Each structure stands twice: as structure tokens, then as C-alpha cells.
Image (cartoon, rainbow, N blue to C red):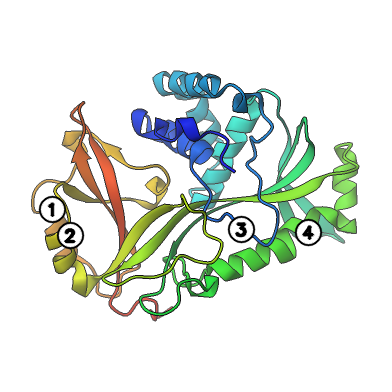
């Protein structure tokens, strides 16, 4: 399902944050192995699959000079994580040998009203594909049956894994087959196509306690943990060595990497935690350990949530 297993460690070797994110987007495993709609890696039929060293070399060259990627990302004023994820995919697909990106965020309209958008339309040797993309971080239940996708919540409490899958399979993915899409597709000379999804991200498990993975989870999915504010001192006391640091939302994709000068100083985490509102939204913290180059790399990530989470005032 992931066509680049040999490149799994590459994001950690890169230094430019946007290039690390790009590499992570392309090589990370999906959240789920079983989905209610077919799942397909957007680069599944690219020439890079047969020659992953070419993809590696392209990413290494970008890491030396990231300006083309930075220029592309700067064209969008939005800082939404989902749109950033899509923009990274678009950049890669425009460069990928054997793949043609036909359209991105294509609006589907009826009578002056927008019914929705098609995330991506691409052509490769296997045909034309409508691909819907999603980047998600879901927190499992503190108690009970984690196999139920309805019990996996986004950090903001409103999003649920089960609800997202239903929206994808019931609305977003069938959109390209609706009569209302015909005009937009005909303008691109598309007569037949297939629709698939690709969902990346992390599943975060409660501490203390255990939760089963949601039904259909990919066996190699990326993991983290979440902790109530009241349990943080006990959690840190049992955690391994390293430096903890707050990770801004814009940096939630690839594992974090910081220079020693950019890491939080001793005591800064506790100062920040003491000032944290008891009803604050979920905060993503990472534990960093020093690598052989003297930089600090993410070893684990943890959401710190209010003791009232997920029952927070809206």
C-alpha cells in the first residue's frame, strides 16, 4: 500500500522543515489498511516506484535548495494543515515522472452553487483518478472499545474517524460520478475515471491505560499518546530522557528536528505548563533526543489535553 518502504527513514535525514514534510507525506504509511472506499497512493503508478532512488535524490536536492517548494507553498495564503498537506502532494505530482496532475481543488457547481470540490485529478499509466486526500490525528478512547471508529476523536473534539470516513465515502468520493461533475470533467477531456482516497496521519493512544486500534487500522500506522493535564507529572516521570517542546500546528506532519539553540531551555516546559489554561485546547508536545549531528530529533509525540476533554465548552 505504501510504495516506498525503503525510504521510510528519509524524512529524519532532511533538514529543511518543508522538505521533511514533503518527504513524510510521500513515504509515510496510511492510517488505515481497510477503508469503506478504495484507497490508493497517488504515486502508485509513477516511475519513482520502480526507481525509489530517483525520488530520494530529488528530495535530497530539494533539501539543498528548497526555494522551488517554498515558492509553491507561498502561493497559498491559507495556513490550514489540510490545505498544506494537499499543496505538498500537488507539488510532488507536478514533478513525478509518469504522472500528470490534471486539476486540483476542482469546484463542482450546480445552478451557481458549489456542491463540493475534487481534491485532485491525475492521469498515469493505470488511467485517470479522482483522489481525495486527508491528513488526520485521532485520539483513542480513555476507556472502552477502541476498535469502534466512532470513538476516535480529533484533538478539537468535533471530528471523528467514523464521521470522516462516512463523509468521504458518502459525499466527497462519489462527487466525480455525479451528473453535476460532467461539465467540469468534459472540459478536461475526461470521460472515464476511478475514485480513491489516501489518508495519512497519526493515531494517539491514552496514557495511562490502553485502547484497541480502530478496526481496519494499518499495522504500521504512526502512533503517539495523549495525556490529561492532571497526569502529566506522572507521565514525564516515567518517560525517557530528552527535551520536551511544544509543536505548533503547522509542524504536525513530519517528525520534528531542531538545532540545540532552538530547543526549549531547562524549566521552560514547566513554566509553560503552569501558565496553561485548564480548558486549553489540546497541545501537541514532542520529546526530542540528540542525534549524532548535534541536532534534536523527535522520539515521541503526546497530546496534552484538558482534564475535561473531550467535554469542553464550545
In percent of the image, x 66 and y 66: which residue is there?
167
Q: In which quarter of the image is residue 36?
A: bottom right
Residue of label 1:
268
Residue of label 4:
174
Tell me which numbered mark, 1 or 4, is placed earlier along the sequence: 4
Q: Do the residues labelled 2 and 1 touch (CB within 8 Å)?
A: yes
- Give the label on residue 272, or none: 2
Tell me which numbered mark, 2 or 3, is placed earlier along the sequence: 3
Alpha-carbon span between mark 2 and mark 3: 40 Å
Alpha-carbon span between mark 1 and mark 4: 49 Å
Alpha-carbon span between mark 4 and mark 2: 46 Å
Tell me which numbered mark, 3 or 1, is placed earlier along the sequence: 3
In this view of the protein, which residue sits in the foreground, 114 or 266? 266
Q: Viewer-nearest of labels 2 and 3?
A: 3
Residue 168, given in percent of the width and then of the height, sits at 67, 61
Q: Do the residues labelled 1 and 4 touch (CB within 8 Å)?
A: no
In percent of the image, x 41 and y 30: which residue is there?
10
In percent of the image, x 59 and y 31: which residue is there?
92
Q: Is residue 15 at least partly visible in the picture?
A: no
Alpha-carbon span between mark 3 and mark 1: 42 Å
In this view of the protein, which residue sits in the foreground, 47 or 63? 47
Q: Is residue 107 above or below residue 139?
A: above
Element type where label 1 sits in the image: helix
Amino acid at each position: 500500500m505504501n510504495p516506498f518502504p525503503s525510504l521510510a527513514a528519509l524524512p529524519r535525514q532532511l533538514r529543511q522543515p518543508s522538505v521533511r514534510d514533503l518527504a513524510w507525506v510521500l513515504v509515510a504509511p496510511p492510517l488505515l489498511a481497510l477503508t469503506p472506499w478504495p484507497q490508493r497512493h497517488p504515486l502508485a503508478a509513477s516511475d519513482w516506484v520502480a526507481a525509489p532512488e530517483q525520488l530520494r535524490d530529488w528530495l535530497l536536492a530539494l533539501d539543498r535548495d528548497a526555494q522551488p517548494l517554498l515558492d509553491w507553498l507561498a502561493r497559498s495564503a491559507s495556513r490550514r494543515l489540510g490545505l498544506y498537506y494537499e499543496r505538498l502532494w500537488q507539488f510532488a505530482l507536478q514533478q513525478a515522472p509518469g504522472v500528470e496532475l490534471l486539476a486540483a481543488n476542482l469546484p463542482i457547481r450546480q445552478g451557481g452553487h458549489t456542491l463540493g470540490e475534487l481534491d485532485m485529478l491525475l492521469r498515469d499509466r493505470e488511467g485517470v483518478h479522482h483522489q481525495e486526500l486527508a491528513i488526520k490525528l485521532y485520539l483513542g478512547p480513555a476507556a472502552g472499545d477502541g476498535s469502534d471508529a466512532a470513538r476516535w476523536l480529533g484533538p478539537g473534539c468535533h471530528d471523528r474517524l467514523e464521521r470522516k470516513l462516512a463523509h468521504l465515502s458518502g459525499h466527497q468520493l462519489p462527487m466525480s460520478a455525479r451528473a453535476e461533475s460532467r461539465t467540469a470533467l468534459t472540459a478536461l477531456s475526461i470521460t472515464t475515471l476511478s475514485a480513491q482516497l489516501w489518508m495519512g496521519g497519526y493515531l494517539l493512544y491514552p496514557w495511562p491505560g490502553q485502547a484497541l486500534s480502530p478496526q481496519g487500522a494499518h499495522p504500521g500506522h504512526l502512533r503517539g499518546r495523549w495525556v490529561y493535564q492532571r497526569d502529566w507529572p506522572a507521565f514525564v516521570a516515567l518517560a525517557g530522557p530528552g527535551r520536551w517542546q511544544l509543536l505548533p500546528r503547522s509542524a504536525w506532519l513530519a517528525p520534528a528536528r531542531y538545532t540545540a539553540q532552538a530547543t526549549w531551555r531547562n524549566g521552560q516546559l514547566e513554566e509553560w505548563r503552569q501558565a496553561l489554561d485548564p480548558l486549553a485546547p489540546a497541545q501537541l508536545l514532542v520529546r526530542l533526543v540528540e542525534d549524532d549531528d548535534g541536532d534534536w530529533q523527535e522520539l515521541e509525540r503526546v497530546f496534552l489535553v484538558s482534564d475535561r476533554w473531550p467535554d469542553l465548552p464550545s
